[in-house]
């Protein structure tokens, strides 16, 4: 199995190297915006004009004459910026993303080298074309062949992401199978009764973030004090994100190492976190409560958790199956009775038919596991071409 993996480190450039990195970020952003503007104008002139990387790449020598500061930047960086614009258009037409937007200064500043980068792991340094040898904080060994290197800037710190490719034999996983129920009171509940408490990273930093934003509102816009305060707010958001990612990595690694088959709910998080404010003609109900629930849902990071489970289970020889979450919290795992009265409270489940009682999150995880079994059985029958009557569980949950 060919694996593509990225290794991210913090780099420690000197003053001259920092100036060059900022300049290259600006050149990459300028070429992206210039190409996007040209493409928009060409489409307005002739709506049959298609995006062409080759045509835009031929403009680079002309732009270097017109804008001499582009000559200081490495040519491959400018070409990769056009490649990013091509990917943005491709994602838009495939309905995977919105229409490409102009890049703003200071927001996700980065540029990429497709080749020419050298790394000396023993000396904790790497060579970047037109920048030189740069020290980096070496925390792990870089494995495989280097495919590309991305330099980024965030919260006044510089990072390098080295994407490599190597071949690895898939081990045979000897773990068990598990169903996972995602929630807010409990971040993840397993079908065997174990559960993980939520981190609530945003909630812990909410007071300090509110005070920092209030202080920002009192300062003169774009003054030095305003810029310093805005940088402080960015660092708080950066700490929130780092704490959440670290927690998700620890949990997902533990689950993937212990279980070969993992069943999770296929949650539509964008629909779950929609605002309830309504329209001017028809006002919404319980807007404040729904706003707090949306904040808690987005603070958990369910989609990132599922993404980590997906690739980690594949690396370890396991499988991840996403099932329909319909009626998983209302179905009795003992008798199969479906009713909203089975869940009288948020935490407790008691079947009105047979009297079975258990924690509601554990019941949800057990039903996710059963739904995963039914889904796999239907897939096997479909592949083998056999016509089989749907099972009782599949009738209940699908």
Image (cartoon, grey):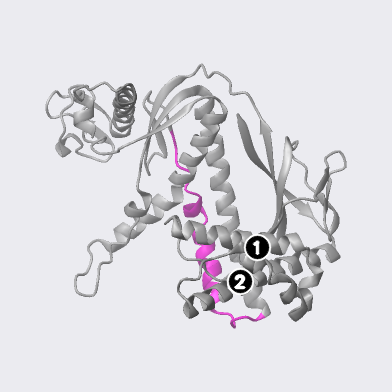
Q: Is residue 46 above or below residue 167?
A: below
Q: Which corner quadrant of the image does residue 181 belong to?
A: top left
Residue, disc 1: 81
Task: For marks 1 and 2, give the CA distance.
Answer: 9 Å
Q: Residues within 10 Å of mark 1 (few under 14, many from 20)?
A: many
Which residue of the protein is positioned furthest toward the left in this rendering?
A: 353
In this rendering, does residue 109 appear at all?
Answer: no
Is 223 displayed left or right of 188 in the figure? right
- Counting from the top left corner in percent of width and height, residue 360 is at 28, 33
Residue, disc 2: 35
- Is residue 234 located in the magenta-colored stretch of the structure? no
- Counting from the top left corner in percent of width and height, residue 121 is at 83, 40
Magenta region: 196-223
**Residue closest to the eye, 62 or 206:** 62
Badge 2 marks a residue whose secondary structure is: helix
Quadrant for the N terminus, please: top right
- Counting from the top left corner in percent of width and height, residue 166 is at 68, 33
For the point 81% across and 70% down, which residue is it?
A: 72
């Amino acid at each position: 199995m060919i694996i593509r993996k990225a290794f991210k480190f913090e780099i420690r450039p000197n003053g001259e190297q920092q100036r060059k990195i900022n300049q290259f970020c600006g050149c990459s952003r300028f070429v992206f915006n210039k190409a996007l503007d040209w493409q928009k104008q060409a489409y307005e002139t002739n709506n049959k004009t298609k995006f062409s990387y080759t045509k835009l790449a031929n403009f680079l020598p002309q732009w270097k004459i017109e804008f001499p500061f582009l000559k200081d930047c490495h040519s491959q960086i400018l070409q990769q910026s056009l490649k990013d614009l091509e990917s943005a258009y491709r994602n838009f037409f495939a309905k995977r993303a919105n229409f490409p937007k102009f890049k703003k200064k200071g927001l996700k500043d980065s540029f990429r080298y497709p080749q020419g980068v050298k790394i000396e792991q023993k000396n904790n340094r790497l060579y970047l074309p037109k920048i030189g040898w740069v020290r980096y904080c070496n925390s792990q060994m870089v494995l495989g062949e280097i495919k590309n290197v991305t330099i980024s800037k965030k919260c006044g710190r510089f990072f390098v992401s080295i994407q490599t490719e190597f071949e690895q034999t898939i081990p045979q996983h000897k773990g068990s199978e598990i169903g996972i129920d995602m929630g807010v009171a409990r971040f993840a509940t397993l079908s065997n009764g174990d559960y993980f408490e939520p981190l609530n990273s945003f909630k812990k930093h909410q007071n300090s973030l509110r005070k920092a934003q209030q202080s920002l509102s009192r300062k003169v816009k774009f003054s030095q004090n305003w810029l310093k305060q805005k940088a402080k707010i960015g660092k708080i958001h950066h700490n929130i994100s780092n704490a959440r990612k670290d927690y998700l990595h620890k949990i997902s690694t533990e689950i993937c190492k212990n279980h070969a088959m993992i069943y999770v709910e296929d949650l539509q998080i964008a629909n779950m976190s929609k605002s309830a404010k309504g329209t001017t003609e028809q006002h919404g109900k319980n807007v404040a409560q729904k706003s707090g629930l949306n904040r808690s849902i987005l603070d958990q990071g369910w989609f990132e958790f599922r993404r980590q489970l997906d690739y980690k289970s594949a690396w370890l020889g396991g499988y991840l199956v996403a099932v329909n979450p319909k009626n998983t919290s209302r179905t009795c795992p003992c008798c199969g009775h479906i009713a909203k009265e089975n869940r009288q409270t948020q935490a407790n489940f008691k079947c009105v038919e047979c009297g079975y009682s258990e924690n509601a999150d554990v019941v949800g995880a057990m039903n996710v596991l059963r739904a995963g079994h039914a889904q796999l059985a239907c897939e096997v029958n479909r592949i083998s071409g056999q016509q089989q009557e749907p099972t009782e569980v599949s009738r209940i949950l699908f």
